[in-house]
Image (tube, rainbow, N blue to C red):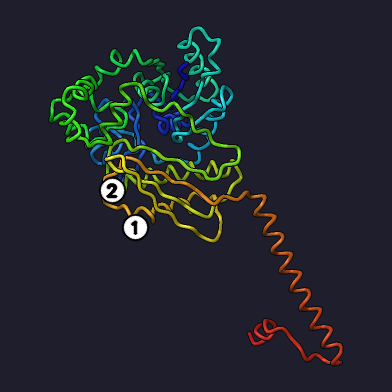
């Protein structure tokens, strides 16, 4: 029996958070980003998209496309609060959850839906309850694996529910433009268009009728990936966060393949905030930061750094990750970045360790003091003194 995997994606999450804070922004052209040289749009409302504004666009170009664009700076502390509310809401239904970002997740609903007759209505009710309780809007994809679930959540926005079974792949996916194929980057699909592939259906046709040309165009790894996904062989494994994790990490696929450091910084900052939030929730500190980067050929690279003072601080995590990126990957075209906090200890254990250390230090100091006092008493005068005391007296 196939699993029922669900992908839940919060619609224009950052913008929606700003609308929740300020309802006057609703139904207006709003973007999250910053002014100045190198300013990049992080995300934008559907109204802004109608004028050509998009994620990753330089701010000045976005304002040229939409002169009345309302630009808001990011408010990650509030976004984290709303993200936590979202995850907490989903956990009322199932604990088989795999985080995919601050605003999206995969979940296994196989057991939950055993006695549900109308799955589509079930998730419509789910969306409405989420909105009524948090004011967040989402789209949901329901499928036997994660790829099809992700394609489903992207199919109808906002507030859409799409069910894609293996038998629905041709009907639902084949007519879609090739750039809508999850996992094919912005620099890959133009190459596909050059060889006559404009839709996902065209891609499927070439997989079976001109395999060699396709492999030459996109590489064997990407070929194998798209072939498996279009045959419904994608992964259905939900990697739930364990109760006592050995590491805390998150990764995110960029809106398009890029080497733009400003876009990378925005994504690293977002991921660092998410990792920090999860570490705080789990009451964990880590002393190793690992950066994961995946290039446009789906090849993964990682670099790490270990330091002496364990942390859960978002700025520390971000700064280490950014340094790793700049020292090792700056200039590379990437499609995914991730940060993992490793070598975890619980805050309680750290407190105990510090207490024991302080006690042992205090105990050793007391022994030295007792020895000095005993010797001076035997000499009948103050002959012995600690070296640290001499330094203090000289100062």
Label 2: which secondary element: loop
Asked if residue 127 lies left or right of residue 385, the reply is left
Decide: is 138 above or below 284.
above
Foreground residue among 315 and 58: 315
Decide: is 21 above or below 355.
above
Q: Position of residue 320 (x, y in %)?
A: 43, 55
Q: Residues within 10 Å of mark 2 (few under 14, many from 20)?
A: few
Decide: is 26 above or below 55.
above
Decide: is 21 above or below 388.
above
Asked if residue 233 lies left or right of residue 81, the reply is left
Q: Is residue 62 visible?
A: yes
Label 1: which secondary element: helix
Q: Residues within 10 Å of mark 1 (few under 14, many from 20)?
A: few
Which residue is drawn at the image coordinates 33% and 38% (left, top)?
A: 254
Residue of label 2: 38
Which residue is drawn at the image coordinates 76% and 88% (left, top)?
A: 384
Which residue is drawn at the image coordinates 83% and 92% (left, top)?
A: 381
Q: Is residue 68 visible?
A: no
Circle 2 or circle 1, nearest the eye = 1
Q: Position of residue 364 (x, y in %)?
A: 74, 72
Q: Position of residue 35 (x, y in %)?
A: 32, 45
Q: Which circle's residue, 2 or 1, is located before the other in the chain?
A: 2
CB of mark 2 within 8 Å of CB of mark 1? no
Numbered disc total:
2
Q: Position of residue 370 (x, y in %)?
A: 81, 78
Q: CA distance from mark 2 to mark 1?
A: 20 Å
Residue of label 1: 327
**In what quadrant of the picture does the C terminus appear?**
bottom right
Residue 233 numbered tag:
none
Foreground residue among 302 and 280: 302
Foreground residue among 353 and 3: 3
């Amino acid at each position: 029996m196939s699993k029922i995997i669900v992908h839940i994606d919060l619609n224009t999450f950052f913008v929606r958070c700003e609308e929740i804070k300020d309802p006057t922004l609703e139904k207006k052209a709003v973007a999250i980003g910053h002014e100045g040289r190198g300013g990049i749009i992080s995300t934008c409302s559907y109204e802004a998209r109608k004028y050509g504004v998009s994620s990753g666009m330089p701010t000045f170009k976005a304002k040229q496309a939409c002169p009345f664009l309302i630009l808001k700076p990011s408010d990650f502390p509030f976004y984290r609060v709303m993200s936590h509310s979202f995850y907490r809401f989903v956990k009322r239904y199932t604990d088989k959850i795999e985080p995919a970002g601050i605003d999206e997740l995969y979940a296994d609903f196989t057991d939950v839906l055993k006695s549900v007759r109308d799955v589509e209505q079930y998730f419509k009710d789910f969306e409405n309850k989420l909105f009524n309780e948090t004011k967040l809007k989402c789209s949901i994809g329901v499928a036997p694996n994660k790829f099809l679930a992700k394609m489903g959540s992207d199919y109808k926005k906002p507030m859409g529910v799409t069910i894609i079974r293996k038998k629905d792949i041709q009907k639902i996916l084949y007519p879609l433009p090739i750039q809508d194929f999850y996992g094919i980057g912005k620099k890959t699909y133009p190459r596909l268009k050059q060889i006559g592939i404009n839709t996902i259906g065209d891609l499927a046709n070439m997989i079976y009728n001109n395999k060699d040309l396709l492999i030459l165009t996109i590489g064997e790894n990407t070929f194998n990936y798209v072939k498996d996904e279009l045959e419904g062989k994608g992964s259905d494994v939900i990697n739930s966060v364990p109760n006592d994790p050995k590491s805390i990490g998150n990764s995110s696929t960029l809106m398009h393949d890029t080497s733009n450091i400003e876009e990378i910084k925005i994504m690293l900052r977002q991921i660092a905030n998410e990792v920090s939030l999860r570490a705080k929730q789990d009451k964990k500190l880590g002393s190793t930061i690992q950066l994961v980067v995946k290039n446009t050929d789906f090849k993964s690279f990682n670099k790490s750094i270990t330091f002496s003072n364990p942390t859960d601080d978002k700025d520390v995590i971000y700064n280490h990750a950014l340094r790793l990126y700049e020292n090792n990957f700056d200039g590379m075209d990437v499609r995914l970045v991730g940060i993992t906090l490793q070598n975890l200890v619980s805050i309680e254990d750290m407190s105990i360790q510090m207490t024991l250390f302080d006690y042992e230090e205090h105990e050793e100091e007391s022994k030295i003091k007792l020895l000095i006092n005993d010797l001076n008493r035997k000499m009948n005068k103050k002959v012995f003194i600690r070296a640290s005391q001499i330094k203090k007296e000289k100062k």
